[in-house]
Image (spheres, grey):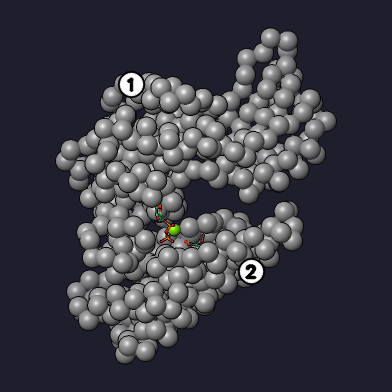
Amino acid sequence: MARIVMKFGGTSVADLDRIRNVAIRVKREVDAGHEVAVVVSAMAGVTNRLVGWCQELSPLYDAREYDAVVATGEQVTAGLLAIALQTIGVDARSWQGWQIPVRTDGQHGTARIAAIEGAELLRRMKIGQIPVMAGFQGLAPDNRITTLGRGGSDTSAVALAASLQADRCDIYTDVDGVYTTDPRIVPRARKLPRITYEEMLELASVGAKVLQTRSVELAMKERVRVQVLSSFSDAPGTLVVDEDEIVEQEIVAGIAYTRDDAKVTVRRVPDKPGIAAAIFGPLAKAGVNVDMIVQNVSADGTTDMTFTCGKSELPRALSVLDNAGKIIGYAEIATDKDVAKISVVGVGMRSHAGVAGTMFQALAERGINIQVISTSEIKVSVLIAAEYTELAVRALHTAYGLDA
Ligand code: ADP
Ligand code: ASP
Ligand code: MG
C-alpha cells in the first residue's frame, strides 16, 4: 500500500465526461488499496477567461481581486470531482485552499506556499475518504485568497505530497510524459523515461509548461517523487529523479520555448555607473520579473538597454519606466511582443563545449536572427522573432540529435 497524491490538469477535467474518467482512475488506485489525495486544476480555458476579464477591466488590476476571481475555476472542479467520485461509490470531500488551509505569503498572483496543514486530510484518508483539493489557491497571512502563478496546481500537488509524506506525486496531464521538447510542435520528440530534477527545473523555468517551475523546485527540496503521466492512457510516464539515477546522460536533455515574454528597449540612456540600478531597481520594487538583459556598447556616451519580462507584466513595466523617466534620462522606449525565447537544456553542458555554437549555427542556417542571448551552467537561451518559433525548435531538435 502506498500513499499517493494524484493531480489532474485542465484538459483532464475539461468537461463532465473527463471528470468521470478521472473519478474512475482515482477509484482504481483506491481499489488497489492505496491512500489517495487528489488535486485538481480548473477546466481547460477557464483560468484564461477569468484572467482575460480582469485585464479587460483594468490592465493594472488589483492583484488581490485578480486572485479572488481566478481562484474560482478550481473551486468548481474540486466540487464536481467529489460528486463524480461519490456517484461511483467512493467517499470524497472537496477542499478549498482556505479550508485546509494552504498557507502562502502575500504575493498575490504569484504566491508561494509556506505550509499545508495536512493533519485533518490525513485523518480522513485513513478512514477511506478521498480529499479533493482545489489546486492553484491558498490563503495569505491577512486571510485573503491567493493564487500561485499560472500552472500552480502542480505546486499545490507537490506541496500536498510533501505535507502528507506521500510515496508519490502523480501529475496526470494531456501528454504521457516529459518529452525532449513539446510534442505538439515537434512530432519527432522523444519521451524521456527519466529526467533529472535539475534539468526539469531548468526546462520548466524556460517554458516547458508540463510542470510549473516551483513544483520542481519544491519536489527537489522536499525529496518528493514526481511522475508525469497521461490521464487518457496507461502508457508509462516520466519519473523525475536525481542525476545519479540516470545511467546514460545526453548532453542536451531537451528544448523549450515560450512566447510569453515581451522585449523592452530603453533607448539612449547615459552610459554611466548607476544606470542599470536606476532602471531595474524600480522594476524589481514593482514586482516586475526581468529575465534576459543586454546592454549595448556606446560610442557617444549613451547606450541602449534591452530586457525581457512577461507580456502580462508589460503594462506595469512601462508605467514604472514612465515614472522613473526623469531619473533614468532615456530618449524613448520601444517594445516588441512578437518575440519567442528558445532554450536548450542539459547537465552535460557542464562538461561539453560547443553546445551554444551548435545552436547559433543551426539558427543561422535557417536565417533566424538572434536578438538577445543568455546562458547558465546548463542552459543557453536566445530571443528570436516569434514567427520562427516552430522552425527554430525543430531545427535545434535535429541539430542535437534528439529526433526519434
Ligand atoms: P495541465 O493542464 O495538465 O497542467 P499543461 O498544458 O500545463 O497541462 O502542460 C502540458 C502541456 O505541456 C502539453 O500539452 C505540452 O504541449 C506542453 N509541453 C511543453 N513542453 C513539453 C515537454 N518537453 N514535454 C511534454 N509536454 C510539454
Ligand atoms: N488553472 C490554473 C492555470 O491555468 C492552474 C493550473 O492549471 O495549474 O494556470
Ligand atoms: Mg499545467
Residue placed most toward the observer, 81 or 37: 81
- 381 or 12, nearer to the observer: 12
Could you say where residue 195 lies in the image, as x and y percent from the top left?
28, 46
Would you name the residue on which mark 1 appears? Answer: 354
Split into 4 quadrants, where in the image is the C terminus? top left
- What's the residue type where badge 1 is placed? Gly
Residue at image point 77% right, 28% down: 332
Quadrant including the N terminus? bottom left
- In the rendered image of this protein, does residue 142 appear above or below residue 330? below
Q: Secondary structure at mark 2?
A: helix
Name the kind of residue labelled 2 in the image.
Ala
Indicate which quadrant contains ligand 3.
bottom left
Of badges 2 and 1, nearer the viewer stands 1
Q: Which residue is mark 2?
A: 68
Instruction: Residue at 25%, 57% (x, y): give it.
Output: 237
Q: Is residue 399 visible?
A: yes
